[in-house]
Image (cartoon, helix red, strand yellow):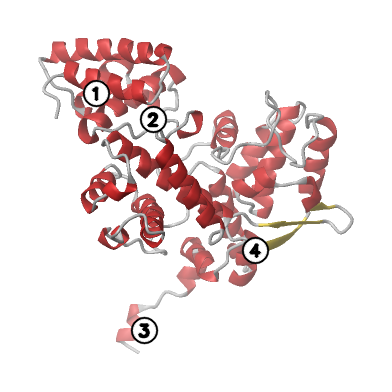
């Protein structure tokens, strides 16, 4: 698409300007581009490729080694993002990996209106988590259309949908499946609402993801204990983080429900927590275990900012408000994992959801019935819980058949 690296960066800067990136940010990009241009010249290359970009990161910053050892600085991470953006824009003519939460994504009022109407329709049909996911999927798709000079939903064609799906190549099948679900929902909406004369959702491919294909990414109980033990509970942030991590590790709350937990959900008189789960929309009642209860009390009395908010857990830097829906609290757990020197293989999950997996696995090893585990985790379907059977090696071993006994009874 672009004959030279200069052509690529010139077009990319125009797109950055269209998306209202600040002059200071664009100057930062130019500085990084100059370093890359010098590297390309040394390599005798006229055009940029993402492969050359990765070689630039390796030669100049030793990026792969620092990434593997967890020593990447924020400045080097930012340069890596510049390289990925160049690769995305060269391939798709669109900026794909952006900080969606930090700026207005859509640039046209017409698409803004379409998105708001679609969001309203979602509120009448889906749970809050699904609403948020579908809205973000639609917003990303509409933003991509804007980058392709599409200004009205009536102009959308099956080719645009396929081109957009190409931008998700290389992602995990589950991630692609989730994006497809959101896109199908949006395309059905614009058809059913009379904004398009064709239901383009039927043109989308399907991604087959076996629900039981993946083994849950569970930690060991010792690893969870190491993380909890390293938290400094003598300061407000440590008190908050300890209570949040304990809620997930001991009761299996989703990170979304931890962020949405309100003071009225804590029923101290009968030692229970009761709230409507964000993902399923079902009422969930859990025991307020002593260690969890005391951790929350310690935070409320000695750590929580004295502000008028119904939410239990708040940010400790201005603005003093609840964590945003886009914040999955991954950085909180990673901070203490590094402090505790807990090693995890590259394929092992590192977020709060891994602690849910750990709890489910531990309950299963204690012969807890699947329906009980499903109730604790807030699963609407016990089949969602059955995936943990694959990590219960002792019980699986008991199911093994002796070939000799079968062949020679």
Dividing the picture into quadrants, the one containing residue 94 is top left
- Asked whether disc 3 touches disc 4, contact meaning CB atoms under 8 Å apart, the reply is no
- Mark 1 vs 2: CB contact within 8 A: no
Front disc: 1 or 2: 1
**Residue 93 percent coordinates (x, y):** 24, 32
Q: Position of residue 39 (x, y in %)?
A: 20, 13
In this picture, residue 158 sits left or right of residue 113? left
Mark 1 or mark 2: name the one nearer the start of the chain: 1
* Residue underneath mark 1: 53
Q: Secondary structure at mark 2?
A: helix
Question: In the image, which is nearer the foreground, mark 2 or mark 4?
Answer: 4
Foreground mark, 3 or 2, reads 2
Q: Which residue is mark 3?
A: 405
Q: Which mark is residue 68?
A: 2
Q: Residues within 10 Å of mark 3 (few under 14, many from 20)?
A: few
Quarter of the figure that contains the N terminus:
top left
- Please name the residue that numbered disc 4 is placed on: 282
């Amino acid at each position: 698409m672009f004959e030279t690296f200069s052509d690529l960066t010139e077009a990319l800067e125009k797109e950055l300007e269209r998306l209202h990136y600040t002059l200071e940010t664009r100057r930062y990009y130019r500085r990084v581009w100059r370093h890359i241009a010098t590297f390309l010249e040394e390599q005798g290359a006229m055009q940029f490729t993402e492969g050359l970009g990765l070689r630039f990161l390796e030669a100049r910053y030793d990026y792969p080694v620092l990434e593997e050892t967890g020593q990447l600085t924020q400045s080097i991470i930012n340069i890596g993002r510049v390289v990925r953006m160049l690769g995305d824009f060269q391939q798709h003519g669109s900026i794909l990996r952006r900080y969606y939460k930090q700026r207005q994504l859509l640039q046209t009022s017409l698409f803004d209106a379409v998105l708001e109407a679609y969001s309203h329709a979602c509120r009448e049909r889906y749970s809050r988590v699904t609403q948020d996911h579908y809205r973000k999927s639609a917003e990303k798709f509409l933003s991509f259309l804007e980058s392709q000079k599409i200004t009205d939903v009536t102009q959308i064609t099956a080719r645009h949908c396929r081109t957009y799906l190409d931008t998700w190549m290389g992602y995990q099948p589950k991630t692609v499946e989730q994006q497809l679900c959101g896109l199908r929902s949006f395309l059905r909406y614009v058809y059913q609402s009379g904004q398009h004369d064709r239901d383009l959702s039927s043109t989308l491919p399907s991604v087959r993801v076996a629900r039981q294909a993946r083994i849950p990414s569970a930690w060991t109980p010792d690893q969870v204990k190491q993380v909890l033990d390293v938290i400094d509970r003598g300061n407000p942030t440590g008190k908050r983080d300890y209570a949040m991590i304990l809620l997930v590790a001991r009761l299996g709350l989703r990170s979304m429900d931890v962020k949405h937990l309100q003071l009225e959900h804590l029923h101290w008189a009968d030692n229970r927590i009761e709230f409507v789960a964000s993902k399923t929309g079902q009422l969930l009642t859990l025991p307020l275990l002593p260690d969890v209860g005391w951790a929350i009390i310690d935070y409320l009395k000695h750590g929580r900012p004295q502000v008028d908010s119904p939410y239990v857990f708040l940010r400790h830097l201005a603005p003093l408000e609840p964590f945003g829906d886009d914040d999955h609290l991954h950085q909180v757990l990673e901070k203490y994992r590094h402090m505790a020197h807990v090693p995890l293989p590259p394929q092992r999950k590192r977020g709060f959801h891994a602690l849910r997996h750990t709890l489910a696995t531990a309950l299963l090893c204690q012969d807890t019935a699947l329906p009980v585990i499903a109730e604790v985790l807030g699963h609407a379907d016990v089949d969602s819980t059955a995936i943990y059977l694959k990590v219960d090696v002792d019980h699986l071993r008991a199911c093994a058949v002796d070939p000799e006994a079968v062949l020679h009874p």
